[in-house]
Image (spheres, rainbow, N blue to C red):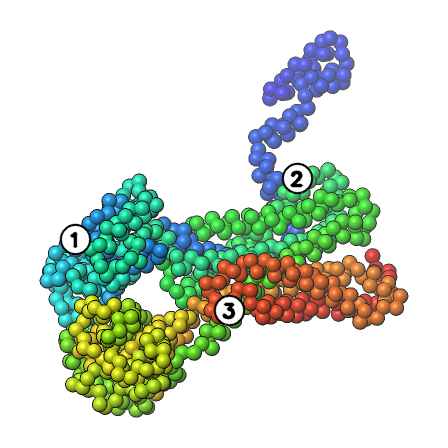
């Protein structure tokens, strides 16, 4: 017998002993001991998870409700999947590049060192050595310079590898120790020092096998033998990918003054970049007296956090798509809130009944939250799946380098972001239905028995506001897409100065066998003869650096005129047929010809930019150019005689398509005995099948150990310079198209619902004499009014937000009026199309049926 029964029985016996009738005694016992069923229910409630049981009930009810409206559920999930999937994919990039810490110990102490006023720039080797000796705020410093690909030979074979020259303390500055061997020592970075290399772990495994010990072995880089000093750890990452690291040599010549060295440093513990920059300025004043080549303009060096420098070029390129994806999600959420309000019209009697039976506003909000969170979770899962499947494809389309130390993937932080977005969107698009249902008149709704209740007008206004918001947000994306598309068009219209169509290019890397330029020219001339013999080839030429690929400059000045000097003159070493092959016109004078030989007086051609700067009057005849000279003195960079200017060639885009042509001079390859640094070849007409094989065979006939690689058309090179702009335009265009579609669906849905609600009114108008054209204009006017208001609101926001696109535009201002006109026409056309179908449906209303419609 339980305790409750025991006490009730004892109380009953006591009452009977005092003379009370059995029935009265039982009732008295129950009043004093209590209702056992109620007690059991209270104890059950106290010992159960009531909140979770109610939540489970709400969840099951939400599933039943959504199953009854599969069309709505499908549209809601797809809309959310679109918005959340785009945000998840772009956030994966943002997290991998902008948020993930660098894979170095205490990475926050790493800084990049550059020139004052441009701390992201490179420095000279002289500056690196001076600051390394005198800085007290930097615990270690190192420099690096990229090198051209070279052949790598071991007993196991030969391959082409990427080479990076680094100074001593390079790995120590990063906080990484070689997995095997050691770093470079100071004697190895001086001319005549021991020739040592450090291999990447990947190259070690590829060339020698897994687990092999290679420190102390000899390898060949090009034609030079080196000793392996060490091996990097497995998984080591540095922004400049390399297979082989060689010592960065200090030559003691003017070459050390060129700003070609990337400099990294590690701050001492507790030192801030601000304090380090203060010391940098003071050291700059000490550095200048001993280096007269650095004039009064020189302000020293400055530091910037390494991660900040690393992502500086791509930060905006990633944040803009992330913002665009956020706008797309906001449009999807607004559209879903509008759809939920439409469903609320259908469910208003159900809600009224629940309120009449005592349901609280909080209970109602919880039910909305459960339903909409369920939609959010379903949309997030679909979006997450889409992001996971498309992420690798999207990364492969990105034309610029991503400074990510690990693969871009959907990892835990990305999953947490997606969950937060799902919960946040579920809450946001629950607010509008909840706020409007909170003002529902229960009595009027119950009496209406299916007719429109008074709160319908409020919900209609809220839906109108949401649709206007969708249109306004769409304007921003459309405006960004229009500006980027117009910018891309302007780039395609830019004058190149050469004819890229029909030109194929390839590269032969440096061959150390030809240490003298004269030997190298004989190799080039032999290859040119072989190329001319290939069927279909009309012209062939050699050039040191292809247009729009990289820069190659030296100081130069006009002989006898120190004022006519350019410190960064672009130098191109070409064969005689280069201008004809590339379609570059000769504006004045002559081109290189048969009279220009190895033994004849050296000649030079200048481009129009140089001619305008040095000879405004056009009198260049008899002028000579001194290579390696500046401000009237020889910098000792090379031993080169004065070169006579024999002609002026047309300007061409040299390094950047978006930048004006740089001052450029052209030297004849046979008259540049100091050049032996690899050759780019241009061939017009070499588009036949198997052309690459024929070229490799031709090169091998001249030099069996040489190779031909990087076959590209000149058109592909030009197109690649527009890759960033094209990617931005397509990305924003895709987001804008989706936003326009969602906004059009919003206008269509609102007008369709409005027509359904106004069936009685439309029938009355037609019965009183309104024509179908009048009804059509009525509905179209409503839709276009919403689009017009959204357009005006959106233009104000677009003017502010598109200013962020300024750095991505070329030849177009952020407030370009023609782009705004195109966006306005496009939006109005889409709004008219979305409004026409509901308007057409309204014209088919039968007045007799409509007058009886409730």
Discs 1/3, front: 3
| Mark 2 and mark 3 residues within 8 Å of each other at the beta carbon | no
Q: Secondary structure at mark 2?
A: helix
Which quadrant, please, contains the N terminus? top right
Which callout, 2 or 1, points to the residue nearer the camera?
1
Name which residue lies at 13% across and 64% down: 226
Q: Earlier in the sequence, mark 2 or mark 1?
A: 1
Nearer to us in this view, 455 or 155 = 455
Q: Earlier in the sequence, mark 2 or mark 3?
A: 2
Is residue 68 visible from the viewing direction of this image?
no
Under circle 3, the secondary element is: loop
| Residue highlighted by disc 1 | 182
Q: Residue at x 30, y 88 (%)?
A: 590
Name the quadrant containing residue 560.
Answer: bottom left
**Hey, which residue is sitting farthest right in the picture?**
768
Q: Secondary structure at mark 1?
A: loop
Q: Which residue is mark 2?
A: 362
Q: CA distance from mark 2 to mark 3?
A: 53 Å
Measured from the top left, where is residue 752 in percent x and y? 72, 62
State left or right for residue 18 relative to residue 99: right
If the image is split into quadrants, where does the C terminus sit?
bottom right
Q: Furthest-top residue in view?
A: 18
Q: Is residue 584 above or below residue 360?
A: below
Q: CA distance from mark 2 to mark 1?
A: 68 Å
Query: For residue 812, which numbered disc appears in the image?
Result: 3
């Amino acid at each position: 017998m339980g305790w409750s029964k025991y006490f009730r029985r004892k109380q009953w016996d006591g009452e009977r002993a005092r003379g009370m009738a059995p029935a009265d005694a039982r009732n008295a016992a129950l009043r004093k001991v209590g209702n056992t069923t109620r007690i059991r229910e209270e104890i059950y409630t106290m010992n159960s998870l009531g909140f979770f049981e109610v939540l489970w009930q709400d969840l099951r009810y939400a599933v039943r409700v959504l199953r009854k409206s599969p069309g709505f559920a499908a549209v809601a999930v797809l809309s959310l999947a679109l918005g959340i999937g785009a945000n998840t994919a772009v956030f994966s990039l943002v997290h991998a590049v902008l948020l993930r810490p660098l894979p170095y110990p205490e990475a926050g102490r790493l800084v990049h060192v550059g020139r004052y006023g441009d701390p992201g720039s490179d420095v000279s080797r002289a500056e690196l050595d001076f600051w390394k000796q005198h800085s007290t705020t930097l615990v270690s410093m190192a420099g690096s310079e990229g090198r051209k690909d070279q052949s790598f030979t071991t007993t196991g074979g030969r391959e082409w590898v990427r080479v990076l020259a680094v100074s001593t303390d390079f790995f120590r500055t990063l906080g990484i120790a070689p997995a095997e061997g050691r770093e470079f020592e100071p004697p190895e970075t001086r001319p005549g020092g021991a020739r040592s290399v450090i291999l990447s772990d990947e190259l070690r495994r590829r060339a020698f096998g897994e687990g092999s010990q290679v420190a102390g072995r000899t390898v060949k880089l090009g034609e030079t033998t080196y000793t392996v000093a060490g091996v990097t750890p497995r998984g080591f990452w540095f922004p400049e990918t390399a297979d082989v690291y060689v010592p960065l040599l200090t030559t003691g010549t003017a070459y050390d003054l060129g700003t070609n060295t990337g400099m990294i440093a590690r701050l001492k513990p507790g030192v801030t970049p601000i304090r380090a920059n203060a010391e940098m300025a003071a050291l700059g004043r000490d550095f200048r007296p001993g280096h007269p080549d650095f004039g009064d303009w020189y302000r020293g060096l400055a530091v910037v956090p390494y991660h900040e420098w690393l992502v500086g070029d791509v930060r905006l390129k990633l944040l803009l798509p992330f913002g665009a994806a956020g706008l797309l999600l906001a449009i999807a959420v607004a559209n879903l809130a509008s759809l939920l309000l439409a469903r609320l019209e259908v469910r208003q009697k159900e809600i009224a009944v629940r309120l009449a039976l005592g349901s609280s506003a909080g209970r109602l909000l919880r039910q909305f939250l459960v339903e909409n969170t369920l939609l959010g979770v379903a949309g997030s899962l679909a979006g997450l799946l889409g992001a996971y499947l498309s992420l690798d494809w999207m990364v492969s389309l990105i034309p610029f380098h991503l400074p990510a130390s690990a693969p871009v993937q959907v990892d835990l932080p990305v999953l947490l972001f997606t969950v937060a977005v799902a919960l946040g969107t579920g809450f946001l698009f629950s607010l509008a239905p909840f706020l409007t249902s909170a003002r529902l008149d229960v009595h009027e709704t119950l009496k209406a028995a299916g007719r429109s209740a008074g709160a319908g007008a409020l919900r209609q206004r809220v839906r109108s506001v949401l649709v206007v918001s969708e249109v306004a947000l769409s304007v921003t994306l459309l405006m960004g897409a229009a500006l980027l598309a117009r910018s891309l068009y302007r780039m395609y219209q830019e004058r190149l100065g050469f004819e890229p169509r029909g030109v194929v290019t390839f590269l032969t890397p440096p061959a150390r066998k030809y240490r003298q330029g004269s030997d190298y020219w004989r190799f080039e001339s032999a290859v040119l003869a072989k190329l001319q013999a290939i069927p279909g080839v009309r012209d062939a030429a050699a050039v040191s650096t292809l247009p729009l690929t990289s820069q190659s400059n030296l100081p130069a000045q006009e002989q006898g005129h120190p004022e006519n000097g350019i410190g960064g003159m672009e130098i191109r070493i070409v064969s005689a047929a280069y201008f004809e092959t590339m379609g570059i016109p000769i504006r004045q004078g002559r081109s290189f010809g048969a009279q220009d030989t190895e033994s004849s007086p050296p000649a030079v051609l200048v481009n129009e930019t140089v001619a305008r700067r040095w000879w405004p009057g056009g009198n260049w005849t008899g002028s000579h150019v001194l290579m390696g000279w500046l401000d009237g003195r020889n910098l000792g960079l090379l031993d080169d005689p004065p070169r006579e200017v024999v002609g002026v060639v047309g300007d061409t885009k040299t390094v950047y398509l978006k930048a004006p042509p740089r001052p450029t001079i052209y030297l004849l390859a046979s008259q540049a005995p100091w050049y032996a640094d690899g050759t780019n070849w241009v061939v017009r007409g070499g588009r036949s099948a198997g052309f690459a094989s024929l070229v490799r065979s031709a090169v091998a006939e001249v030099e069996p150990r040489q190779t031909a690689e990087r076959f590209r058309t000149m058109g592909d090179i030009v197109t690649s310079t527009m890759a960033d702009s094209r990617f931005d335009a397509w990305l924003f265009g895709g987001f804008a198209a989706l936003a326009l579609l969602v906004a059009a669906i919003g206008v269509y849905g609102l007008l369709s619902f409005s027509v359904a609600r106004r069936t009685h009114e439309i029938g009355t108008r037609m019965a009183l004499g309104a024509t179908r054209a009048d009804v059509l204009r009525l509905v179209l006017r409503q839709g276009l009014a919403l689009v017009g208001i959204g357009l005006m609101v959106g233009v104000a926001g677009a003017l502010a937000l598109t200013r962020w696109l300024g750095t991505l535009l070329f030849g177009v201002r952020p407030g370009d009026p023609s782009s705004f006109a195109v966006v306005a026409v496009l939006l109005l056309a889409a709004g008219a199309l979305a409004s026409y179908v509901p308007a057409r449906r309204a014209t088919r209303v039968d007045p007799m049926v409509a007058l009886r419609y409730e």
